[in-house]
Amino acid sequence: MKKSCLGLLILSLFLFLSFSTGAYAKIITLRMASQNPESSNSHIHCIMPWVKKLEEVTNNQVKVQIFASQTLVKGKDAWEGVKRGIADMSWCFHGYWPGMTPLADVISLPALGFKTGEKGSEVLWKLYDKFPAIQEEFSANKVLLLYTSHPYMLITRDKQVKTIEDIKGLKIRMTGGPPTEMMEALGGVPMLIPMPDNYISLQKGVIDGMGSPWEALQAFRLYEVVKYYTDAPFPAVYFSVAMNKKKWNSLPADIQTAILGISGLEGSKWWGRNWYDKAQDRLLEQVKKENVEIDVYHLPEAERARWLEIGGKPVWEKWVKDREAKGLKDAQAVLDATLELLK
């Protein structure tokens, strides 16, 4: 009788432990949206390594299913898609939504002076951390990190742009907000076109050129349809990696802590560095293999100063006035903090 009871007790304990272990080890799947193809360097060298890190730091309790090439939501719908729960998480390009994050737009002002995506990402996250008004702009979703490109270069199809006069009247694809205002100040015609559509737009002459980082030149093979490159004091653009709030709140506390450990300031710098700063060498290696020549024209200092005075500082001043007129009293403080952080 005692042996039977002992055996039953051991069996019950075994089943309890098995059930508890199974419940604890239940896999959480996160659906991640991405507008870029799986063959892109951003996917290979940034998204996939970060996802792998996320799975590792959560002891493989979290698995991320990536929907590349806009197969879950379109790039321009990523923020809303996360908010509505169509995607659990996504990287989101905020240039698609002018006016949605007006104070964070400060990092897209032209000619701020930083040269790398890592530095821009550091500054943007510190601004987010410092100003509750910026946090409120992103409050619809759970922001894990914020990152920026390096400042864009100008690529054109039919002629080399060497002076401000060369750009007048050209249809140039730009992102919304300060980059669009800069192009208007320089005399160009800004065009707002989703990144995946720019190859055919350049090929067919719908646009004469665009601002582009090295990463996009390779990811979308833009070097096949442009001939000319100009290093000008162009703006950078910025992004978030965001999660659906309901999904985030459903995660166990230890899982949230693990994910935050690869996010925030260090995660932002990591994405800026791996998405953008390392892209130039990868592109130059690829075009060398394909026997394509890339020749970048660097503006002389005197011409660069003209661009700053005409398309730079006036945009800064307008940026502050426009936001203060809309009741965003922190605008000047945000600009001042940005310039200070960039020192």
Image (cartoon, rainbow, N blue to C red):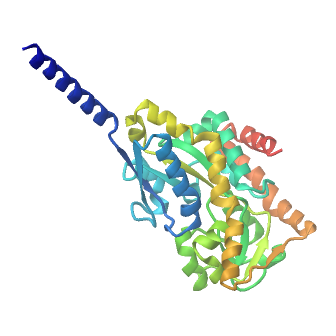
The answer to whether residue 212 is visible is no
As drawn, the residue found furthest toward the left would be 1
The spot of residue 127 in percent (x, y) is: 68, 40
The spot of residue 254 in percent (x, y) is: 45, 31
The spot of residue 170 in percent (x, y) is: 70, 78
Please state which of residues 259 and 212 is positioned toward the viewer in this rendering: 259
The mark tally for this picture is: 0
Please state which of residues 15 and 238 is positioned toward the viewer in this rendering: 15
As drawn, the residue found furthest toward the right would be 302
Please state which of residues 185 and 261 is positioned toward the viewer in this rendering: 261
Please state which of residues 209 and 183 is positioned toward the viewer in this rendering: 209
To which quarter of the image does residue 154 belong? bottom right
Give the residue drawn at x 78%, y 41%. 341
The spot of residue 235 in percent (x, y) is: 72, 60
Give the residue drawn at x 58%, y 45%. 145
- Horizontal side, residue 308 vs residue 46: left or right: right
In the rendered view, tell whether residue 39 sits above or below residue 203: above
To which quarter of the image does residue 327 belong? top right
* Quadrant (top left/top right/bottom left/bottom right) for the C terminus: top right
* Quadrant (top left/top right/bottom left/bottom right) for the N terminus: top left
To which quarter of the image does residue 296 belong? bottom right
In the rendered view, tell whether residue 102 sits above or below residue 220: above
Give the residue drawn at x 72%, y 47%. 321
- Horizontal side, residue 19 vs residue 167: left or right: left
In the rendered view, tell whether residue 343 sits above or below residue 24: below
